[in-house]
Structure formats: C-alpha cells, structure tokens
Amino acid sequence: MRLSLGWWALALGLAACSGGGSAAERTGNAAGDIALTATPEEIQLLWDEAMEAYRRGEFSITAENLERLVLEFPPGDPRITKAHFYLGESYLGMKDQLQAVREFRRVSDERPNDPLAPVALLRAADAYAELWRRPELDPSYGQTALATYQELLNRYPDSEAAERTRARVLELQEWFAVKELKTAMFYLRLKAYDSAILYLKAMVADYPRTEVAPEALKKLVEAYRKLGYDDDVEETCGYMRRFHRDEAETAAACPATIQES
C-alpha cells in the first residue's frame, strides 16, 4: 500500500527526533512507492532520497531513483541536468563506466552552457581513463579519454575543470610513454634492435617530458651501441646532457670519456 505524503513527513520527523534510520531504511525505495505520475511533492521526496542515498554511497539506489526522476521532472526543471550528472557519478561508482559516459555526455552536449557541463565532460573522460587499466593493455579507451580531455580544453579553456584536466592529461601521457617503452623493451629482449629503436625514438619525440623519458634515451643509446651507430650515440648523448644532465640515466648511458668537460 502506498503511504501518503503526510505519513512520510511524520515518519521523517519522528525518526529525526528518535535517531532512527535513513529514509530509505524506514520506507524502502521511494521509486517503487510513488505512483506512475508523481506530484511535485512526491518528486521532491524522491529527489531528497536520491541525494541522501548518493551521500551514503548507495549508488544503485541513487541510480534507480534518478532514472525515475528524469521521467517525472516537468520540462525545464533545473534538476534534470543535475539528475543526469549524479546518474553519471552513480554509474561510475558502480563501475559501469560506459553508462556513466552516456549520462555525463547528456549534460555536456545537451546543456553546454550549464555550470556542470565542463565538469561532466571531465568526468566522462575520467570514466574512459578508468577503462584503460594498465599501460600494456589496448590503449583505445586511453586514447578516447585523451581526446575527451582535449575537447574540454577546447570548449572550456578557462574553467576550473580545465585546470584539473591538464593534470589528467599529463598522467595519461605518462601511461602512453610507459606503453611505448614496454614495447621497445620487448624488442630489445628479442635483440630486434632496429624495431626497438623505432619505438624508443617515437616515445622520446612524443613524450619528452615524461618521467620515463630518460630511461628510454638510455635504452636508445644502448641499442645504437649494439648496432655500432656511433654518430647516433653521440647525438643522443648530447641531447641527454642538454636536457637530462642530472639524471642517473645520463651518467650511465654516456660515460665521462665522451661527455663535455
């Protein structure tokens, strides 16, 4: 039997006074208790329960309630955009990253001028980044994440989300660099030095400021030495002395006998 709103208000008030459980614990899921066509009061009640569930980290309850709400909200209700945003966060909390992306995209694409739009685009990119779980795996989701971060920087360059995005881009670039280095190391173990050199040179060119760049340069010098490419050794050592003078990899790859005094 569906409880009246008056009973709901009384129950909530009594529970607050007595230190009882949450609204969800006392009544069950409001999404299942409210009639198909909800009144404004019932919509507000369901919204409050969804937000309470979200704060508790009960993402499945949050998602169920918000899915109902987006069908019940009247056109133009300002909570529609927030509902899609919190749906995205809830799906992300449930590790359903692709569904989260769809909800975040609804915010950024359907309401591009809303204050939540840049944040939603950031979170969509974060969801893609989560799907690239290790550098050695297929980087397709990482590439999509990077493209989405770049989209945010292009669309909302002065937003607070853009500042956070720049840090995320650096983290992704580090992963791409690690992936290239791991591939090069695979070829080095096979003594396929020419193939290793191609990956190492590409990594250094594409990600010169990453933490693994000095290690890649060191391996590049070693591969050149194996093949007797003395001119390339000298050129690479010169680059390392110029841009990575204080790195341990520079001292290891380029002995003092060939360094500048």
Image (cartoon, rainbow, N blue to C red):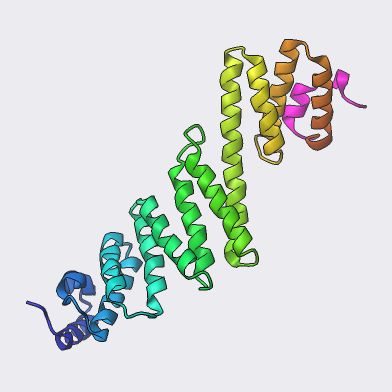
Question: Quadrant location of residue 236?
Answer: top right
Q: Where is residue 258 in the image (x, y as percent from the top left)?
A: 87, 20
Residue at 78 percent across and 26 percent down: it is 251
The N terminus - image quarter = bottom left
The C terminus - image quarter = top right
Q: Residue pushed farthest left?
A: 1
Question: Quadrant location of residue 184?
Answer: top right
Q: Is residue 250 magenta?
A: yes
In the picture, measured across the screen, residue 93 lies left or right of residue 133, that is left
Would residue 1 be seen by someone viewing this image from the given angle? yes
The magenta segment is 246-261
Where is 145 relative to 159, above or below?
above
Residue at 23 percent across and 84 percent down: it is 39
Residue at 35 percent across and 57 percent down: it is 91
Q: Does the magenta stretch include residue 228?
A: no
Where is 217 relative to 96, above or below?
above
Q: Position of residue 111 (x, y in %)?
A: 48, 71
In the picture, measured across the screen, residue 9 lies left or right of residue 222, that is left
Where is 44 relative to 234, above or below?
below
Where is 79 relative to 227, above or below?
below
Question: Quadrant location of residue 82?
Answer: bottom left
Q: Nearer the viewer, residue 114 or 24?
A: 114
